[in-house]
Amino acid sequence: MKPLSPASPHAIIPGSGKSTFAERFADTFQAPFVNQTKLQKEFKLSGVKSQTLRQLILNEYAKTKRTIVIEGGVDTKSSRTELAKDLAAAGYKPLLVWVQ
């Protein structure tokens, strides 16, 4: 399959049943994948520091205007709303996906 390149880039944010779906989706469509949970564990970061690192990485990916897949850090409504607002400001259309 070809990489996704819609007129407006999307930010795919799995909200539930996440990790396997997110990884496979990113692989299938050759989309950049940011996994906050993995960053937190790999670098032994606090939740706040891993969120800051995720945001720095997302800011760089946003410059490419490619669809991206984001995992982790969206456990609360307020965190989802804040992430969606930041992504929209960068020109993305956030898409929250709930996987059963």
Image (cartoon, rainbow, N blue to C red):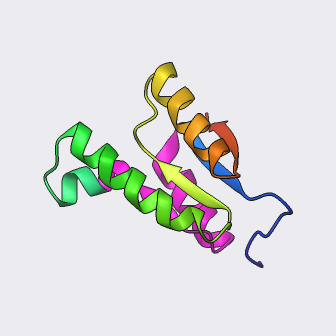
Snapshot quadrant of residue 88: top right
Left or right: residue 58 compared with residue 46: right
Q: Residue at x 38, y 57 (%)?
A: 56
Q: What x and y, as percent, mark residue 70?
A: 51, 51
Residue 28, compared with residue 38, is above or below; it is below
Q: Residue at x 63, y 75 (%)?
A: 30
Tell me where the magenta segment starts and ends, as one range: 15-38
Residue 95, compared with residue 44, is above or below; it is above
Q: What x and y, as percent, mark residue 50?
A: 27, 48
Left or right: residue 91 compared with residue 85: right
Q: Residue at x 46, y 50 (%)?
A: 19
Q: Is residue 32 magenta?
A: yes
Residue 62, compared with residue 17, is above or below; it is below
Q: Is residue 98 magenta?
A: no
Q: Residue furthest top?
A: 77
Q: Residue furthest left?
A: 44
Left or right: residue 19 compared with residue 15: left
Q: What x and y, as percent, mark residue 90?
A: 63, 52
Snapshot quadrant of residue 13: top right
Count of picture labels: 0
Left or right: residue 22 compared with residue 6: left
Q: Residue at x 77, y 79 (%)?
A: 2
Q: Residue furthest right?
A: 7
Query: In the picture, which quadrant includes the N terminus?
Result: bottom right
Between 28 and 76, the one lying in front of the other is 76
Q: What x and y, as percent, mark residue 55?
A: 41, 51
Query: In the picture, which quadrant includes the C terminus?
Result: top right
